[in-house]
Image: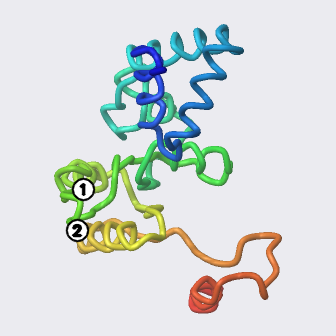
Amino acid sequence: MSAPVSFKALIDALKALPGIGPRAAQRIAFELVQHKRDAALRLAKALEGALDKLGHCERCNTLSETPVCAVCASSRRDASLLCVVETPADQITLEQSGAFSGLYFVLLGRLSPLDGVGPGQIHLEKLVNRATDGTVKEVILATNFTNEGEVTAHVITELLEGQGVKVSRLARGIPIGSELEYVDAATVAQAVRERR
């Protein structure tokens, strides 16, 4: 017996999500349709509402329901500090740390020539204009520590050299609460090189 078309469509939609394979998609679909119909309806409404209301902030590119997000609009933020992150999720993580009180610029990606992602796709020209507007004194590069994130940070550093703005990179090292013997050698080496 073949599954109904609408059920197959639900499974296909779930498989499109990161980390959800065919079997997990099928289990989630069955759970939503058989046992969690109220939750499924809430999910559908929330997803529709998010897609309808969310856009990108004109200044920093993060997700926002207004043309300028709450962080960019806040007078309490230090406008002389601009933290560059790859995604809105990265920005939320930094915000939750409570360690940064400046403004952000969300690249919405990272340089990856093999995937066809170049400077235009991650808004580097807009970043340079924002970083050199006369208000920003320091740009903190908080791209991920992947090969693509490192290349992106390097290119941004080169673009901002000689522009009258300080460029710094988020520190790397040993996670708090970890034991040295269980940390990989590359992380230990980086921590030694970036000791203070």
Task: Return the residue at label 2.
Answer: 159
Q: Nearer the viewer, residue 124 or 3?
A: 3
What distance separates the C-alpha of mark 1 from that of mark 2? Answer: 7 Å
Horizontal arrangement in the rendering, residue 32 relative to residue 181 (left or right): left
Q: Is residue 157 above or below residue 119?
A: below
Task: Return the residue at label 1.
Answer: 128
User: Is residue 31 something one can see in this rendering?
Assistant: yes
Q: Nearer the viewer, residue 154 or 38?
A: 38
The residue located at (66%, 45%) in the rendering is 96
Could you say whether the residue bearing mark 1 is in a helix, strand or loop? helix
The residue located at (23%, 59%) in the rendering is 115
Q: Is residue 13 above or below residue 85?
A: above
- Percent across and percent down for residue 67 are 34, 23
Assess disc 2: are there few (<14), some (14-19) or many (≥20) residues with their C-alpha within 10 Å of its C-alpha.
some
Horizontal arrangement in the rendering, residue 7 relative to residue 174 (left or right): left
Q: Specify which label sits upstream in the sequence, 1 or 2.
A: 1
Query: Which amino acid, mark 1?
Result: Val
- Percent across and percent down for residue 21 are 51, 44
The residue located at (33%, 37%) in the rendering is 59
Q: Identify the image quadrant of the C terminus.
A: bottom right
Could you say whether the residue bearing mark 2 is in a helix, strand or loop? helix
Task: Name which quarter of the figure residue 4 lies in.
Answer: top left
Assess disc 1: are there few (<14), some (14-19) or many (≥20) residues with their C-alpha within 10 Å of its C-alpha.
some
Are the residues at dot 1 and dot 2 in contact (C-beta closer than 8 Å)?
Answer: yes
- Percent across and percent down for residue 170 are 52, 68
Q: Nearer the viewer, residue 39 or 196?
A: 39
The residue located at (43%, 23%) in the rendering is 8
How many numbered markers are drawn?
2
Query: Which amino acid, mark 2?
Result: Leu
